[in-house]
Image (cartoon, rainbow, N blue to C red):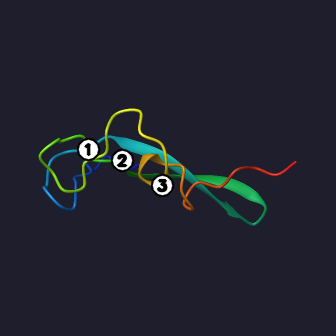
Amino acid sequence: MDSEVHTCPVCGQPVDTVVRRHKTLGAWVPVWVAGPCRDPECAAYVAEGAKGAEAGKGPGKAEPRS
């Protein structure tokens, strides 16, 4: 796991680290990436509890198939 601190690419403020995943050789592999910016004065701000691609529901997050 990374020990680096993720920052917002727009304002440079620290952001939470979130886990995404991708499928490699038939197995889901975790990937730790920067989360959304929570600074209300930032252009990349995402409100707490927001829905959509900015909140982690976009194409980067795959749902497992049965």
- Drawn side of residue 29 relative to residue 6, left or right: right
**Distance of mark 2 from mark 3, alpha carbons?**
12 Å
What whole-number distance in Å separates the C-alpha atoms at marks 2 and 1?
6 Å
**Which residue is located at x 27 percent, y 51 percent?**
6
- How many other residues sit within 10 Å of disc 3, few (<14), some (14-19) or many (≥20)? few
Residue to which mark 3 is pinned: 53
For the residue marked with disc 3, what is the amino acid? Ala
Task: Check the image and report above or below for 28 versus 15.
Answer: below
Q: Earlier in the sequence, mark 2 or mark 3?
A: 2
Mark 1, residues whose alpha carbon is within 10 Å: few (<14), some, or many (≥20)?
some
Label 2 environment density (alpha carbons within 10 Å; few <14, some 14–19, many ≥20): many
Task: Find numbered disc 3 in the image and state the secondary structure of the residue it sits on.
Answer: helix
Identify the residue at image location x=21%, y=62%. Answer: 9
Q: Mark 1 = which residue?
A: 15
Kindly identify the residue that appears in the image at 43 percent across and 44 percent down.
18
The residue beneath circle 2 is 35
